[in-house]
Image: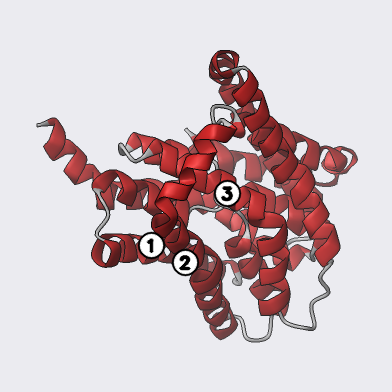
Amino acid sequence: MMPFVTPLGVVIGFLLGSRLEPFRFLGPYIFACITFVGALGVSISQFAKIGTRLKSVAVVLFCAHIILPILVTLLARLIFPNQPEIVTGFILLTSIPIAVTSFIWATIYEGDAALALSLIILDTLLSPILTPTTIKILADTAVSIDQRGIMISLLGMIVLPSLLGMLVTQVAPEASKKAVLYLSPITKILLIVIVLITVGVLGDTLTFSLVYVPLIIANLVVIAMGFFLVYAIARYALKVDKASLVSMTFTGGMRNISAALVLATTYFSPLAALPTILGIILQQTTVAVIGSLLFAKKKVNKEQ
C-alpha cells in the first residue's frame, strides 16, 4: 500500500501547511525510531559476515555513492542549468543512505536477505561521512551547505539508532524478532507522519508550476538509473547468483528519501526539497514496476 499511501500523505501535508510547523522538531526523533526498528533482526555477528561478500558490497557502494551521484549531477545541471538549488536537491537525493524498505523488496523477489541487510547497515554507518562529503564536492558553490549539521543529524537519525538496534538484537535475538512483528506496522504509520510534517512545513513556500514536469521526468530517470546501473554490473560483469543480484539491485537503486526530506527541510531551501518530495511520491511505485520487469518473470517460472 505504500505507493498509494505516501502520495496521500504528501497531499494532506500540503493542505495542512504551516499548521504542522509546531511539530517540525519531531521529525528527527520519529525517524530515529524508524531506523531503530529497521535495525532489529540484524545482530553484530551477522553484520560481521559482510566481510565474506566484499566484492558485491564494493560494487553497490561504488555505484550508489560515486558513479550515480556524478551522473545525476551532470543530468540535473543539463536540465536545470540556472537552478542550483534543484541540482543540489538531486545530489542530496542520490547521496542519502540506502533505503531500509529495499530489504522488503529484496525478500519479495527472493533475494539474499543477509546481504541486503548488511548493505543497508554498512551504508547507514558510513552516511555521516559519505552524504555531506558528496554534497560538498558536487553541489554548486553558490549553495550554502551546513556540512557539520548534516553529519550530526545523520548520526542522530540513522547511525546511533542502527547501532542500538543491532546491540539489542545481539543481546536478545528472540525478543527482537517478536518485537519487529508488532513494531514494523507502526513504523509505516510513523513514516507517513514524517512526510506529513516535513511537507506541511514547506506547504506555504512552494507553488505548483511547469517546473514540476521536468522534475518528475528527471526523478523517474534518476530512480531507474540507479537500478539498471547496479543490475547491469552485477549480472554481466560480476555474474553473481540470482539471490545476490536481486539484493544488490534493490539496495543499489533505493534511497532513504524520507531522511533526505528531513535534511532538505532543515538545511536547504524549499526548492532543494522539491526533488525529495517528488521522490517520496514516485520511488515506491517506480520500484514496483522495475522489480516486476527485472525479476517477476523469473519468479513465476520458478513457481511453475
Of the residues shown, which amino acid type is indicated by label 2?
A: Cys
Using the numbered discs, state the Cα–Cα distance from disc 2 to disc 1 in whole angstroms: 7 Å
Residue 175 location, x and y as percent? Answer: 59, 13
Tell me which residue sits at (59%, 66%) in the image: 212
**Res 187 visible:** yes
- Nearer the observer, 213 or 230: 230
As drawn, the label of residue 162 is none
Return the residue nearer the eye: 138 or 193: 138
User: Is the C-beta separation of discs 2 and 1 under 8 Å?
Assistant: yes
**Image vertical order of residue 262 relative to residue 192, above or below:** below
* Occupied quadrant, residue 206: bottom right
Q: Residue 122 carries which label?
A: 3
Residue 184 higher or lower than 35, as above or below: above
Q: Earlier in the sequence, mark 3 or mark 2?
A: 2
What residue is shown at x 38% (from left), y 46% (from top)? 247
Task: Give the mark nearest the N terminus, 1 or 3.
Answer: 3
Q: Which residue is nearer to you in this view: 70 or 12? A: 70
Residue located beneath label 2 in the image: 63
Lower position in the chain sequence, tag 2 or tag 1 = 2
Which residue is depicted at the point 29% across and 46% down? Answer: 292
Residue drawn at the location 36% of the way across and 40% of the way down: 112
Helix, strand or loop for disc 1? helix
Q: Quadrant of the C terminus?
A: top left
Q: What element carries label 2?
A: helix
Direction right: furthest residue: 22
Which structural element holds mark 3? Answer: helix
